[in-house]
């Protein structure tokens, strides 16, 4: 087999692995979306009860203002403005061209997938107390949860070869903390049901992981001065 043939075959297997991985991550999101569309009572009851308790807690303990701040700074526009700045820095200053290109495309495609998913499910936002600001638009999946998961995960993959062992652990911990904080913010401010947030988390991780193994692969020697994959 010629070198070109080997390259084509290798890329084909990578794409196939990416598609299979995306299917595995998409399945639970599809199940949740179907349950939401069909108004599956056990799920709806849990979601409504959780939102009522969470928003009541936020109002009772004076957390609404702080939650609004988290909501504002975790807007996808803000998150991606910062993330794309890091991507450009990694491309130009650290010569991680392959990773940087992958990172930018993955985040923008993921953002579009999230927006499209909302139009498919068309779930209304939670009905909350007047003391809690009401958010416009559809609810499933949570755009904040999906996009912060996308951006945080992409940043870890992008910067991995530049980090020490301790730096990698810190990076993963910080990314996880930020993702969880934004997810909880969406629930406690009454912007999303818990199932919306869970779907956003799963879809975000699925897009990043599937994109990585589909287009970069488990090894990424080009444009990477260090270890090529989080392990």
Image (cartoon, rainbow, N blue to C red):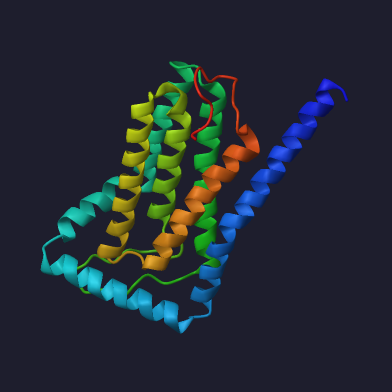
Q: Nearer the viewer, residue 144 or 154?
A: 154
88 horizontally vs 19: left or right: left
Q: Residue shown at 73%/39% (left/top)? A: 13
Residue at the farthest bottom position:
41
Instruction: Examine the rendered structure and indicate whether residue 97 appears above or below residue 67.
Output: above
94 horizontally vs 5: left or right: left
Q: Position of residue 134 (x, y in %)?
A: 28, 67
Residue at the farthest right position:
1
Q: Nearer the viewer, residue 181 or 171?
A: 171
Tell me, yes or no, if residue 30 can be seen here.
Answer: yes
Number of marks in the image? 0
Q: Nearer the viewer, residue 66 or 81?
A: 66
Q: Residue shown at 51%/21% (left/top)? A: 96
207 horizontally vs 166: left or right: right
Q: Residue shown at 61%/56% (left/top)? A: 24
Q: Residue shown at 56%/33% (left/top)? A: 102
Quarter the N terminus occupies: top right
Instruction: Examine the rendered structure and indicate whether residue 171 appears above or below residue 24.
Output: above
Q: Quarter of the image holding residue 78?
A: top left
Instruction: Examine the rendered structure and indicate whether residue 101 appears above or below residue 74.
Output: above
Tell me, yes or no, if residue 109 can be seen here.
Answer: no
Residue at the farthest left position:
61
Q: Quarter of the image holding residue 170?
A: top left
Q: Position of residue 219 (x, y in %)?
A: 60, 28
Instruction: Examine the rendered structure and indicate whether residue 155 appears above or below residue 110.
Output: above
Q: Position of residue 58 (x, y in %)?
A: 18, 65
């Amino acid at each position: 087999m010629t070198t070109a043939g080997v390259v084509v075959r290798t890329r084909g297997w990578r794409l196939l692995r990416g598609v299979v991985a995306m299917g595995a991550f998409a399945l639970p999101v599809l199940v949740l979306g179907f349950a939401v569309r069909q108004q599956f009572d056990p799920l709806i009851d849990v979601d409504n009860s959780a939102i009522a308790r969470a928003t009541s807690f936020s109002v009772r303990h004076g957390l609404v203002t702080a939650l609004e701040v988290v909501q504002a700074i975790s807007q996808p526009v803000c998150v991606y403005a910062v993330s794309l700045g890091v991507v450009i820095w990694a491309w130009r200053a650290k010569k991680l061209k392959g990773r940087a290109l992958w990172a930018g495309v993955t985040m923008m495609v993921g953002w579009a997938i999230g927006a499209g998913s909302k139009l498919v499910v068309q779930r209304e936002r939670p009905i909350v107390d007047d003391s809690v600001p009401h958010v416009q638009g559809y609810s499933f999946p949570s755009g904040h949860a999906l996009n912060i998961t996308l951006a945080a995960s992409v940043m870890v993959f992008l910067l991995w070869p530049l980090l020490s062992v301790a730096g990698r652990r810190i990076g993963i911990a910080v990314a996880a903390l930020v993702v969880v904080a934004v997810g909880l913010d969406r629930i406690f401010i009454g912007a999303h049901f818990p199932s919306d947030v869970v779907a956003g988390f799963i879809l975000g991780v699925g897009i990043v992981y599937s994109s990585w193994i589909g287009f970069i692969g488990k090894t990424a020697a080009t444009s990477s001065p260090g270890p090529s994959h989080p392990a």
